[in-house]
Amino acid sequence: MLMKKHVTFLVCLATSLMITWVGFADSTKQKEPAPPKPGPAGKYSIKEIMQKGFKTDGNLKELIIDGKATTTQKDQFIDYAENLAKYKVRKGEQADFEMLVADLVTAAKSKDLKGFEKAASCKACHKAHKIYPPKKK
């Protein structure tokens, strides 16, 4: 009977040690890095470019159109637009997107405010390239 208890104890001990060793060995394995999350192609996210460049009160686009933008603000808008060109579109043709962004950058660098206003049209780019969420019923 004493021998049976010893054998049972040794089997339990061996099993515990084995489970511990397997768990430890598994935790020390070099884990593969997670695939990178989709993020900004350039320095800025699209959300940041759209918010600061086009949408918020006192956005850079409106300041430029109104003729109130400083040189620094114009340069910031140009930087946003140049970074926008680094994105790959998921809807529409990439060449069309690149042409629209190139026109935007060129117009932002020029002094032609009417040309800039036309190039900075949200609808021209969004109609062809923005993926809208499904409409709520």
Image (cartoon, rainbow, N blue to C red):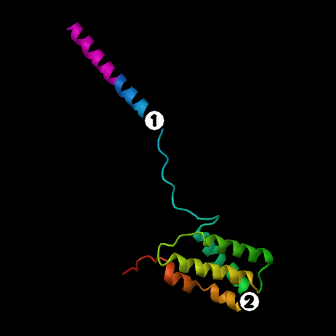
Does 90 appear in magenta? no
Query: Overall secondary structure of the magenta stretch?
Result: helix
- In the figure, is residue 44 to the left or right of 28? right
Q: Tell whether label 2 touches label 1 (CB within 8 Å).
A: no
Who comes first in sequence, dot 1 or dot 2? 1
Q: Which residues are magenta?
A: 1-16
What's the residue at 56%, 69% (across, down)? Answer: 87
Q: Quadrant of residue 117?
A: bottom right
- Within 10 angstroms of label 2, few (less than 14), some, or many (20 or more) residues? few
Mark 1–mark 2 distance (CA, rounded to whole Å): 61 Å
**Which tag is nearer the camera, tag 1 or tag 2?**
2
Amino acid residing under circle 1? Lys
Residue at image x 68%, y 90%?
Answer: 115
Which circle marks residue 51 in the picture?
none
Residue to which mark 1 is pinned? 29
Relative depth, front residue between 97 and 58:
97
State left or right for residue 119 relative to residue 4: right
Where residue 44 sits in the image (x, y, percent)?
63, 66
- Tell me the quadrant of the picture where the C terminus can be found: bottom left
Asked which secondary structure carries label 1, the reply is: loop
Residue 112's disc is 2
